[in-house]
């Protein structure tokens, strides 16, 4: 628990990077450098094929395993898909849903993302729901409306108890993989807005309890300032999570 009385979650998103043959080295380095105190939750969202072997390598450590997508269907004839039940059975605890790359390259709609969210929750795992505006949307001054609409549609079927088990990640699309980070003030403003939207849909207790992360080019040099914002409860980290040294430095920054 952080002083804000909600969980700080530092989650890596490897995307389609690294190889199974490199897991041993990564895990060894991570175990060596990871701060021992449990000031925050540490998660690695990896390609699904690497989840089980990495889980074995990290057994006994404080790291939880996550993946980057899930099927919206429960089971059956859906070639190439992976179900929430299969992930859960393999030891996965977190699932990213609605990442902007899935919205952009796989045509994922808010409705589909909402169904995936419910599957993850029903299987007892924690969803990390990604929301965020594109650069043209921000330039047009529409960022708040865009994020509020994404939230409204994806959260439509949730009750307050389910909402409290959900992590929301604010990821401005223009900051993902670009090296261009939102300023701490921009990150804070939208994370506060997200909490306000949760309060309006659910209640104040739920809004206080939900972990809201910032994601977008977070790295060891900007993490402390971003994570110090009152409504920023952690980070979703792409590029910098591929290097265990940098990832551990961000985990360290979450303590400050
Ligand atoms: C992400 O993929 O969620 C992300 C934030 O990537 P990066 O840190 O590389 O911008």
Image (spheres, grey):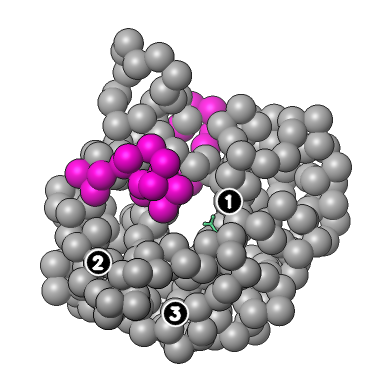
Q: Report crowding for label 1: few under 14, some 14 to 19, many 20 or more residues within 10 A (C-alpha).
A: many
Residue in view at x 58 percent, y 51 percent: 13
Q: Which mark is residue 66?
A: none
Q: Which of the marked residues, 3 or 1, is nearer the chain's N terminus?
A: 1
Pointer 1 residue Cβ closer than 8 Å to ligand 1? yes
Determine whether label 3 and label 2 are within 8 Å by CB: no
Q: Is residue 205 left or right of residue 43?
A: left
Number of numbered markers: 3
State the SS at label 1: strand
Which quadrant of the figure has residue 192?
A: bottom left
Q: Quadrant of the C terminus?
A: bottom right
In the picture of the structure, the residue carrying the numbered disc 2 is 146
Res 187 label? 3
Q: Position of residue 114 (x, y in %)?
A: 24, 45
Q: Comparing marks 1 and 2, which lies closer to the viewer? A: 2
Q: Is residue 29 above or below residue 183?
A: above
Residue 7 visible from this viewpoint? no
Height in image: 120 above or below 39?
above
Taking the spot 39% from the left edge, 26% from the top edge, the residue there is: 83
Q: Is residue 200 among what the camera can see?
A: yes
- Residue range corresponding to the magenta coloring: 88-111
Q: Nearer the viewer, mark 3 or mark 2?
A: 2
Residue at (30%, 32%) from the top-left corner? 72
Relative vertical location of residue 81 with respect to residue 251 in this rendering, above or below: above
Q: Position of residue 104 (x, y in %)?
A: 39, 47
| Residue found at x 72% / y 52% | 242
Q: Which mark is residue 13?
A: 1
Sort mark 3 into few (<14), some (14-19) or many (20+) by Cα contacts within 10 Å. many
């Amino acid at each position: 628990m952080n002083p804000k009385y909600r969980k700080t979650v530092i989650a890596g998103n490897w995307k389609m990077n690294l190889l199974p043959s490199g897991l041993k080295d990564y895990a060894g380095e991570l175990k060596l450098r990871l701060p021992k105190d449990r000031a925050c939750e540490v998660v690695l969202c990896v390609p699904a094929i690497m989840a089980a072997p990495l889980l074995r390598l990290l057994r006994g450590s404080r790291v939880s395993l996550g993946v980057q997508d899930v099927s919206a269907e429960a089971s059956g004839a859906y070639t190439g898909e992976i179900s929430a039940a299969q992930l859960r059975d393999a030891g996965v605890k977190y699932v990213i849903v609605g990442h902007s790359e899935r919205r952009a390259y796989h045509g994922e709609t808010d409705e589909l993302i909402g169904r995936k969210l419910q599957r993850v929750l029903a299987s007892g795992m924690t969803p990390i729901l990604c929301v965020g505006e594109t650069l043209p949307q921000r330039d047009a001054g529409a960022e708040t409306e865009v994020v509020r609409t994404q939230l409204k549609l994806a959260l439509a079927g949730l009750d307050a108890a389910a909402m409290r088990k959900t992590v929301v990640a604010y990821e401005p699309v223009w900051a993902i993989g670009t090296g261009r980070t939102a300023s701490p003030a921009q990150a804070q403003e939208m994370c506060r807005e997200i909490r306000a939207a949760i309060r309006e849909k659910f209640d104040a207790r739920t809004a206080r309890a939900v972990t809201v992360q910032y994601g977008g080019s977070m790295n060891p040099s900007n993490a402390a300032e971003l994570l110090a914002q009152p409504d920023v409860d952690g980070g979703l980290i792409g590029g910098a999570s591929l290097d265990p040294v940098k990832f551990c430095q961000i985990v360290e920054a979450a303590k400050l």
